[in-house]
Image: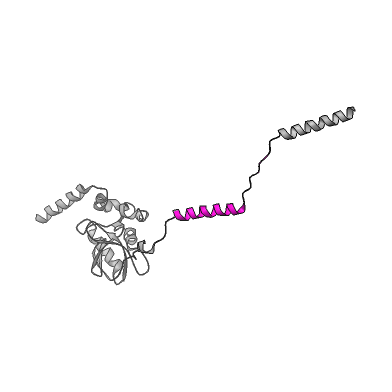
Amino acid sequence: MEIIVIIVSVCVLFAFVKRGRPRRTITRVSKHKTAVSESKSHEGRRAESPRFEPKGAAPVKPPVILEGRAYIIDGDTLVIQKTQVRLFGVDAPELNHPYGKKAKWALVSLCKGQVITAEVTEKDVHGRTVAKCSLPDGRDISAEMVKIGMAIDWPKFSGGKYKSMELPDVRKKLWLADARQNGRMHVWEKFEAQERARGKG
């Protein structure tokens, strides 16, 4: 009799515990829904990205190249195909400045009998065409003029490309070019005023 009572009590207790335990609900996401949601997200991303319109694309301009024999004006200016060209990134003395004539003849010596290639980069404030000029063997003429001490780097335009090629104390030698680069135009103007006074005397 006692055994029956115990068995009944256990059954009642088990039923009570089972009824009181909360059911776990499992949410299943079908592969179909996942695929649909992914495709929608891809469509959204595609809608956000701009379309390539061939008509709206800006054409890339090919570089302007001048080739031919050069007529030398001064240490950093030459004429190719009737176009006055300023050497890119360097500054040489003016003809009436110290070493001006030497700089001109150094450039004449480099370019004499050669076909010069000039890749145009821009127009300067004086309307001159600025170009990276090279010799037939590929040497950069601006670099060659700096290496022989007849021009100095102009960082404002070259980004310092030729600075390491400068000879020691070259800026003391080409002091007027250095003065112009550093905004000391009063030094330049004073020198030219003295030269004019000498000419009148």
Q: Is residue 35 magenta?
A: yes
For the C terminus, the image quarter is bottom left
Q: Nearer the viewer, residue 79 or 150?
A: 79
Relative image position of residue 148 (x, y in whole percent): 32, 60
Instruction: Tell me: residue 151, above or below residue 7.
Output: below
**Residue at the spot 13% in from the left edge and 54% down from the top edge:** 196
* Colouring scheme, one of rainbow, by chain, secondary structure, one colour: one colour
Relative image position of residue 53 (x, y in whole percent): 39, 62
Q: Main secondary structure of the magenta part?
A: helix
Q: Nearer the viewer, residue 152 or 77?
A: 77
Q: Is residue 196 magenta?
A: no
Q: Which residue is farthest top?
A: 2
Which image quadrant is residue 166 in?
Answer: bottom left
Magenta range: 23-47
Instruction: Tell me: residue 143, above or below residue 6.
Output: below
Left or right of 116, for residue 17: right
Relative image position of residue 120 (x, y in whole percent): 30, 63
Relative image position of residue 169 (x, y in whole percent): 31, 51
Instruction: Tell me: residue 160, above or below residue 53.
Output: above
**Residue at the spot 18% in from the left edge and 50% down from the top edge:** 189
Left or right of 33, for residue 194: left
Q: Which residue is farthest right?
A: 1
**Residue at the spot 31% in from the left edge and 69% down from the top edge:** 116
Q: Which residue is farthest left?
A: 201
Which image quadrant is residue 52 in?
Answer: bottom left
